[in-house]
Amino acid sequence: DTGVSQDPRHKITKRGQNVTFRCDPISEHNRLYWYRQTLGQGPEFLTYFQNEAQLEKSRLLSDRFSAERPKGSFSTLEIQRTEQGDSAMYLCASSLWRDSSGNTIYFGEGSWLTVV
Amino acid sequence: SQQGEEDPQALSIQEGENATMNCSYKTSINNLQWYRQNSGRGLVHLILIRSNEREKHSGRLRVTLDTSKKSSSLLITASRAADTASYFCATVHSTGNQFYFGTGTSLTVIP
């Protein structure tokens, strides 16, 4: 149990619908990351927050994707107008970042999305 | 984009044998980390090695790092069936902001 929790764990949605995933990081962690992983691949970086500020977004994060971390604690990842290509596992991770030397990120169990 | 590449993609060994998997990367890094993932689960951090370190041990795990060759290896000694999982290396850029994962090595340990 890493302490990062994600909800829901599984979501099946019809193409065109919106979905939202929630992530609760380890409580004292100031950084929160979102990754996407498809079968047989490693996690791909989507975005990360330091406290409530979204500091970086991947080109993978199209304008249909939006992430927030309003109070610097939990985060949501919303996908609008879902497409079949969005089917993947969405992983959240958090870390206590002090400097660049030894940052370790801790993952949640992931949220599986299936778009039918 | 993914920066690390693990080799081999799949590895099958008998329980008790050692398992070695390699990771190559492309740019300068701050540190390199190895993670394990059981099927359908999240990733679990195993070990971190900094760019100024050459070798590190943790229990049955031994990690080496060769920054001149931009490569790392993970050795699991005396493997157990419970070690069956996918193993990923993650390279951390010098800013420490981004983690780039490879495609992973799928390890199967046969009892």
Image (cartoon, rainbow, N blue to C red):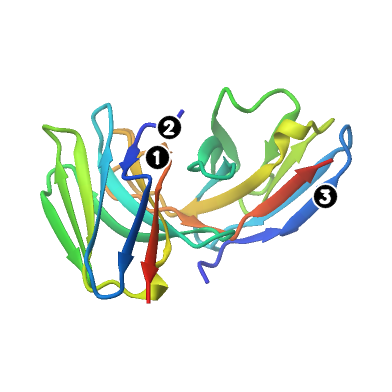
Q: Which mark is residue A12?
A: 3
- List x then y, in percent, for residue A29: 49, 56
Q: Which mark is residue B2?
A: 2
Kind of residue at badge 1: Gly
Distance between the Cα atoms at labels 1 and 2? 6 Å
Do labels 1 and 2 touch, CB within 8 Å?
Answer: yes
Residue, disc 1: B102
- List x then y, in percent, for residue A59: 57, 22
Q: Is residue A101 above or below residue B2?
A: below
Residue in the picture at 58% in, 45% down: A39
- In the image, A82 versus B51, the foreground residue is A82
- List x then y, in percent, for residue B87: 38, 54
Kind of residue at badge 3: Ile
Quadrant of residue A88 within the rendered picture: top right
- Write down the chain letter for disc 3: A
Element under label 1?
loop
Left/right placement of residue B14 relative to residue B50 reads right
- List x then y, in percent, for residue B64: 15, 51
Left/right placement of residue A64 relative to residue B33 reads right
Residue A69 appearing in the image = no
